[in-house]
Amino acid sequence: MTKQKKVDIAIIDHKNFAVQKKSLKNIIEKIISASKKEFKSLYVYFVDAEKLLELNKKFLNHNTDTDIITFSYSESEPFESEIYISFEMANRNAQKYHTKFDDEILRLIIHGILHTSGLTDKTAVQKAFMRKEEDRILANLKNREFIEKMNLGLVSN
């Protein structure tokens, strides 16, 4: 197996949600390595639920809340991708599924990377396989603390 080339990773956080970018970049590099796929670039945007709904309507014609949207700009390796994650929806999911918030964010990043590299989750069998891959990769990650600030209680202007 060839060594993974340096991936251009950018993390764009939100005024109400900030991460330790260096720590998260290191974790993302490990996730990409575990995916066994080659990436050229991966941009991860943390947005509020309202912004993700807006993107969902505009680009996917879905008028529903979601926790993640992945835009892939290449069909083969090396992959280029943007992942938009609603930190608010991730927080709701973490509470709903009784998991750590950091782990839920990482699961979403893993999910986006798996989508970019060709996996889909349209059928029950595909969903089960993707969940198994998410669990495998998440289980192998150590030191998963990277959130600096999360303020979900701010009133919008």
Image (cartoon, helix red, strand yellow):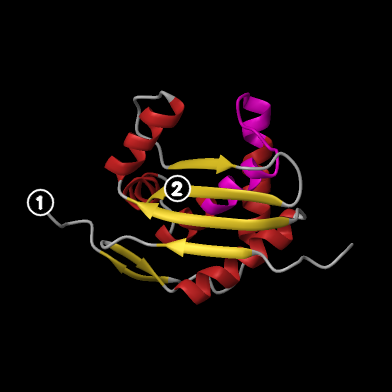
Q: Position of residue 150 (x, y in %)?
A: 29, 64
Q: Is residue 62 magenta?
A: no
Residue 25 falls in which quadrant of the image?
A: bottom right
Mark 1 / mark 2, whichever is N-terminal:
2
Q: Looking at the image, is 80 positioned above or below residue 141?
A: above
Label 1: how many Cα within 10 Å (few below 14, some 14–19, many 20+): few
The residue sitting at 35% across, 45% down in the picture is 89
Q: Where is residue 85 in the image (x, y as percent from the top left)?
A: 43, 49
- Please name the residue that numbered disc 2 is placed on: 84
- Evaluate whether residue 6 shows in this view: yes
The residue sitting at 42% across, 46% down in the picture is 97
Q: What element carries label 1?
A: loop
Label 2: how many Cα within 10 Å (few below 14, some 14–19, many 20+): many
- CA gap, disc 1 and disc 2: 22 Å
> Magenta residues, as a range?
109-128
The residue sitting at 70% across, 44% down in the picture is 117
The residue sitting at 33% across, 35% down in the picture is 53
Q: Is residue 115 magenta?
A: yes
Q: Looking at the image, is 57 positioned above or below residue 6?
A: above
The amino acid on which the numbered mark 2 sits, given as a three-letter code, is: Tyr
- Evaluate whether residue 140 shows in this view: no
The amino acid on which the numbered mark 1 sits, given as a three-letter code, is: Asn
- Please name the residue that numbered disc 1 is placed on: 157
